Image (spheres, rainbow, N blue to C red):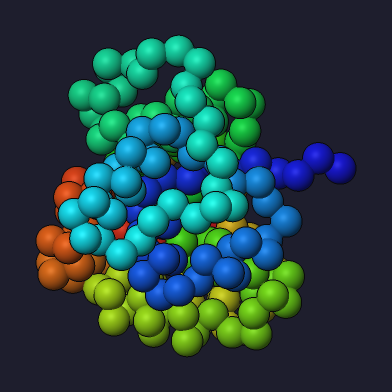
Amino acid sequence: MATEVVVTNTGPLIALGRIDAFSINEQLPLRFVTPAEVADELGAGARLGHPVKLPTWVEVVPLARPLSQISVQALDVGEAAVIQLATELDANVVCIDEWRGRRAAAAVGLRVTGSLGLLGRAKALSIIGSVRPLVDKLAGCGVHYHPDLLSALGHDKVAAQRVFGTVASSAQRLRPAIKTNPGWCQTSGLLVPHATWILARQTQ
């Protein structure tokens, strides 16, 4: 069976990098790729002193076609490039935390996951015993999730697996939840211009 490809955006890499969770994600049976636009965003942040750099297990794949200017008008460059790369590679999973990017990905039929979804997948595969300590670290960075979703992750491996990504036939299946801490947004805003909301709950 071919390894599932996940096209990742900047936001989840920043969130997981800040809580030192890269070693967990590296153990997932997934092939992580990202467009050059996301790598450039992380590189720009690193040059300005931001601590998160692109991990070696994320493969940078350039777009085959110029980035659609229509999508750039609605999304930031990284999100638009992630969605376009997923369609070019025929990869059906994208990893995006920002609500506008998630809704746009869902609208074109992509499965959507995020930083919490990756941790849920790690729990489902017994790579980690509990998501809670990592969620608490994320909370310290100003990232919060719906309590019902956290409860499912804490008690049910099947639910934890489902959090990884659902087939979303409509953007209406995804709901934005709790606003992130403004301090965290200010810190990462240079890299993730639209990281003012994090999508915390998915309709199963």
Which residue occupies the foreground of this view, 128 or 132? 128
- The quadrant of the rendering that contains the C terminus is bottom right
Counting from the top left corner in percent of width and height, residue 8 is at 48, 45
Whether residue 59 sits left or right of residue 190 in the image: it is right
Whether residue 52 sits left or right of residue 28 in the image: it is left
Residue 196 appears in view = no
Residue 86 appears in view = yes
Which residue occupies the foreground of this view, 122 or 41? 41
Q: In this view, does 108 lie above or below 157?
A: above
Which residue occupies the foreground of this view, 71 or 27? 27
Counting from the top left corner in percent of width and height, residue 183 is at 13, 70
What residue lies at 69% left-to-right and 75% top-to-bottom? 127
Counting from the top left corner in percent of width and height, residue 137 is at 38, 81
What residue lies at 56% left-to-right and 21% top-to-bottom? 88
Q: In this view, does 114 lie above or below 24?
A: above
Please identify the quarter of the rendering in which residue 146 is found. Answer: bottom left
